[in-house]
Image (cartoon, rainbow, N blue to C red):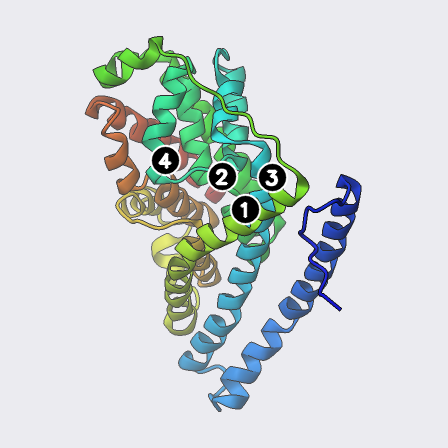
Amino acid sequence: MEPINLFTKGDATPNTQRGKLLVAGALGLVFWYLIYMQLEPFSFFFAYSLLGLEKGSHLGEAIQFFVYDTPKVMLLLTLIVFVIGMVRSFFTQERTRKYLAGKRETGGNVMAALLGIVTPFCSCSAVPLFIGFVQAGVPLGVTFSFLVAAPMVNEIALVLLYGLLGWKVAALYLGTGLLIAMVSGWVIGRLKLEHWIEDWVQELRAGEAIVIEEKLTWTDRVTRGREAVRDIVGKVWIYVVAGIGVGAAIHGYVPEDFMATIMGKDAWWSVPAAVVVGIPMYSNAAGIVPVVEALLGKGAALGTVLAFMMSVIALSLPEMVILRKVLKPKLIAVFIAVVGMGILFTGYLFNLVI
């Protein structure tokens, strides 16, 4: 008997294909959950029984943290990237430009920030995306709301924060990240800085953006999800391991409450210092969230840590270098200043009320 291929189009009706995909997805989710629930017991077994390390020792805690968090983050990452890869098949970059073209500011800022969560984006796509928005007639402020939200308030950051730190922290990050994106874009739009876009980009404004529509089946969307896992997880896994390695070292060797002295609520300078340190760093949400988890566990204030994370993701130096191809230095400086002030406000606010 030949094996049944759940993803074969053949003569199957759309309802039949959808039913098979639902069954396969349910079985896969059950298998994923069973593995996920065994990770913590396995990490304790590995560190303290198999390796024979002493419980409470620096090395033991570091090894247990690393063995637990590495597969945990990778499982969360794989699941959410697959799901969002399917969701993103409904929100292509071309369709996003079409939605935002001609939108007025304020309402456009809100829509751009929300679309930034689910639209494919990375630093390498910042220039073509910016050009496409300009060509489609999207206002500058609306474009910047998207450019802030897309890398900072993305599905990887939200799901990892939820899985490692709980829904309250994830919700706070989502709300403040979207607010920063909306307000920053609105402010930049009010300043009327279009003349600080490079001249060759402004010449494209008269052009007409081409929107290519694709008709995808559910099988195609599942394929998009699998491709997203291969592409995204394949690129970021090294940052995940490196970030968890740093987090493990902090978890195992940094004394309890040590971070409270340099990243705590009482250190007024900790929030701006965290932003200044974060901007030149190059990482992504998958790599920085495990570090955030470890810093919070050692007494660092939530506002300071979130300000650090936001600056690393939203104001990374590599993205600024790439955007220099289409923006004049003055506009890049305004962008960094406006978003940076929003991040500072968020950090101080959280440290004040939480």
| Circle 1 or circle 3, nearest the eye | 3
Question: Image height check: is 345 above or below 242?
Answer: above
Q: Residues within 10 Å of mark 3 (few under 14, many from 20)?
A: some
Q: Position of residue 231 (x, y in %)?
A: 45, 51
10 Å neighbourhood of mark 4: few (<14), some, or many (≥20)? few
Q: Residue at x 54, y 39 (%)?
A: 174
Q: Check disc 2 and report the residue beneath it.
A: 153
Height in image: 131 above or below 245? Answer: above
**Three-letter code, disc 4:** Ser
Q: Earlier in the sequence, mark 4 or mark 2?
A: 4
Query: Residue 87 bears which disc, if any?
Result: 3
> Observer-nearest residue: 92 or 321?
92
In this picture, residue 81 sits left or right of residue 204: right
In what quadrant of the picture does the N terminus appear? bottom right
Identify which amino acid the numbered label 1 is placed on.
Leu
Q: Position of residue 34 (x, y in %)?
A: 69, 69
* Badge 3 element: helix
Q: CA distance from mark 2 to mark 1?
A: 7 Å
Badge 2 crowding class, 10 Å Cα cut-off, few under 14, some 14 to 19, many 20 or more, is many
* Residue holding disc 4: 125
Foreground disc of the pair 4, 2:
4
Q: Is residue 184 visible?
A: no
Q: Earlier in the sequence, mark 1 or mark 3?
A: 3
Which structural element holds mark 1?
helix
**Where, quadrant-wise, is the C terminus in this rendering?**
top right
Residue 172: percent from left, percent from top: 55, 41
Q: Are marks 2 and 3 in contact (CB under 8 Å)?
A: no
Q: Amino acid at mark 2?
A: Val
Residue positioned 69% across, 57% down in the render: 5
Q: Which residue is mark 1?
A: 158
